[in-house]
Image (cartoon, rainbow, N blue to C red):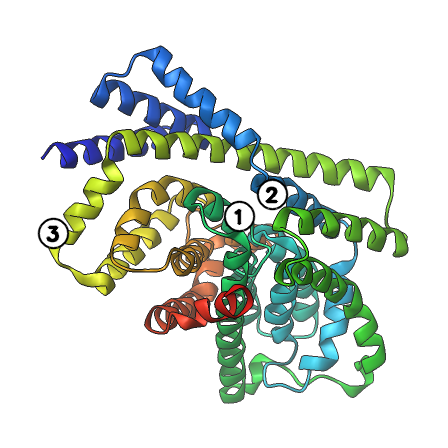
């Protein structure tokens, strides 16, 4: 009973502080401190000592160095014409497929996700060109916007993913293995999206008008346009998967590669560097402060034995591994209605990881599952960030964008079901690469 009361107190504190509108990292610090005082009667000096150790450990974490570097890399790419080149390069490759250039949303988001690590950045970069161009060419706006909302969320799953780095640090698992685990599920979801677009447009050709041969881009020119982003993908992910570099080292290589690329494209300037650095500093400060607060929350819950007691209580309920996954899936979908992806991960992981591992699930697999559930939240109002990005790009009301994204929401649930039934979809590549 004491365990149940402790868990309920922590849950009420989380809902109260985050519902009050305070910044997420402050809310997590308040939850941890209040829980330690109310439940364990810790004195202030002991709480301060615990927090001090966590601050030092987080500040000296080599793995966390990848976060600001990948964010800066994405910020620089966002300020180049990479999205225009991406659209031009993909056009001749997808023009003859049923659905035509709508597939550029899916293929473009999948490729850009491999150098971005952010769902919002992926949606904004790809959407700023495709949302305008597809409308001009007469493509169905609902299908176009819906596919972009769904495919843009792949920025969280396909490496290098900021959310996966956060999960790896908090769950203390290999980030390189996590990155490898996200590749095939990401490709699977992208395939489901493209298959759906092709089927819908085959059944109703008016959704995607036939492309004029007069506007065709030569294949050689298309490959030239794709070379910059493909080069970055090969450099960054190749360095990680070959074992030549850690994720943090690969992020540094990616930043240098992006700087060289921007210089070669004659888009490197002092204003661009200043704007990208400021954007990276703001985002990195937010993410890293949340991570420190989340580590403090995890430690506080450990002192209160909440994760262990929750795992014991779930085992006693005899709901089975798949019963637990179904409950967690519903739980994460509900959280996605109100919280952003990083907040969901850092808040829930101290409670959910222990029961999942106790049920026999691989923590690497659970990382992929959790990221997919977070991606679902990117497509659900009222806090679906992809929906807000698309509203800003198109001016379409957010409720209409949410309706357009609904089929892709369902398709991602299908993807979650497939990796749950066949976990080797996520685990085969990391096992093949790293043993």
Q: Are marks 3 and 1 in contact (CB under 8 Å)?
A: no
In this rendered view, identify the residue nearer to me: 264 or 121.
264
Q: Residue at x 85, y 52 (%)?
A: 260
Q: Which mark is residue 250?
A: none
In this rendered view, identify the residue nearer to me: 191 or 203.
191
Which residue is under mark 1?
A: 165
Q: Are marks 1 and 2 in contact (CB under 8 Å)?
A: yes
Residue 265 image point, x, y percent: 88, 56
Label 2 secondary element: helix
Q: Is residue 286 left or right of residue 365?
A: right
Which residue is under mark 2?
A: 67
Which residue is under mark 3?
A: 316
Q: State how far apart marks 3 and 2 are (Cα).
A: 39 Å
Around disc 1, counting alpha carbons within 10 Å, would you say few (fewer than 14), some (14 to 19), or many (20 or more)?
A: many
Label 1 secondary element: helix
Q: State how far apart marks 3 and 1 are (Cα).
A: 32 Å
Q: Is residue 260 left or right of residue 393?
A: right
Quick check: 297 above or below 121?
A: above
Residue 413 image point, x, y percent: 38, 67
Residue 331 image point, x, y percent: 29, 51
Q: Residue at x 78, y 65 (%)?
A: 85
Around disc 3, counting alpha carbons within 10 Å, would you say few (fewer than 14), some (14 to 19), or many (20 or more)?
A: few
Residue 319 figure quarter: bottom left
Sooner in the amino-acid sequence: mark 3 or mark 2: 2
**Whether residue 127 is visible:** no
Quadrant, the N terminus: top left
Residue 40 figure quarter: top left
Sooner in the amino-acid sequence: mark 3 or mark 1: 1
């Amino acid at each position: 009973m004491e365990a149940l009361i402790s868990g309920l107190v922590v849950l009420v504190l989380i809902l109260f502080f985050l519902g009050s509108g305070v910044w997420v990292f402050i809310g997590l610090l308040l939850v941890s401190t209040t829980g330690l005082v109310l439940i364990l009667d810790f004195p202030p000096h002991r709480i301060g000592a615990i927090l001090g150790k966590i601050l030092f450990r987080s500040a000296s974490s080599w793995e966390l160095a990848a976060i600001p570097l990948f964010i800066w890399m994405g910020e620089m790419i966002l300020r180049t014409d990479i999205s225009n080149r991406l659209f031009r390069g993909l056009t001749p490759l997808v023009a003859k497929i049923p659905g035509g250039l709508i597939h550029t949303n899916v293929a473009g988001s999948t490729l850009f996700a491999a150098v971005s690590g952010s769902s919002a950045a992926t949606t904004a970069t790809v959407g700023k060109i495709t949302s305008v161009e597809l409308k001009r060419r007469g493509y169905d706006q609902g299908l176009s916007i819906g596919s972009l909302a769904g495919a843009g969320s792949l920025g969280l799953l396909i490496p290098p993913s900021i959310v996966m780095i956060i999960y790896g640090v908090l769950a203390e698992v290999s980030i390189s293995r996590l990155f490898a685990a996200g590749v095939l599920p990401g490709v699977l979801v992208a395939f489901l999206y493209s298959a759906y677009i092709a089927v819908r447009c085959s059944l109703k050709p008016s959704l995607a008008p036939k492309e004029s041969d007069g506007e065709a881009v030569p294949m050689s020119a298309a490959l030239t346009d794709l070379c910059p982003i493909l080069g970055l993908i090969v450099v960054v992910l190749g360095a990680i998967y070959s074992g030549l570099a850690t994720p943090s080292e690969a992020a540094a290589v990616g930043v240098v590669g992006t700087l060289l690329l921007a210089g070669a494209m004659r888009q490197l300037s002092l204003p661009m560097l200043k704007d990208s650095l400021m954007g990276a500093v703001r985002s990195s400060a937010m993410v890293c402060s949340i991570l420190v607060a989340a580590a403090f929350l995890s430690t506080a819950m450990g002192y209160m034995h909440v994760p262990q007691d929750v795992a014991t209580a779930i085992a006693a309920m005899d709901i089975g591994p798949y019963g637990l996954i179904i409950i967690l899936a519903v739980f994460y979908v509900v959280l996605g209605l109100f919280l952003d992806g990083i907040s969901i991960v850092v808040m829930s992981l101290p409670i959910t990881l222990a029961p999942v591992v106790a049920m026999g699930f691989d923590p690497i697999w659970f990382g992929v599952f959790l990221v997919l559930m977070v991606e679902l939240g990117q497509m659900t109002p009222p806090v679906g960030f992809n929906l807000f990005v698309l509203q800003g790009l198109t001016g379409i009301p957010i409720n209409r964008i949410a309706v357009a994204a609904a089929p892709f929401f369902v398709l991602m649930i299908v993807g979650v079901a497939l990796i749950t039934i066949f976990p080797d979809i996520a685990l085969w590549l990391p096992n093949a690469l790293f043993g």
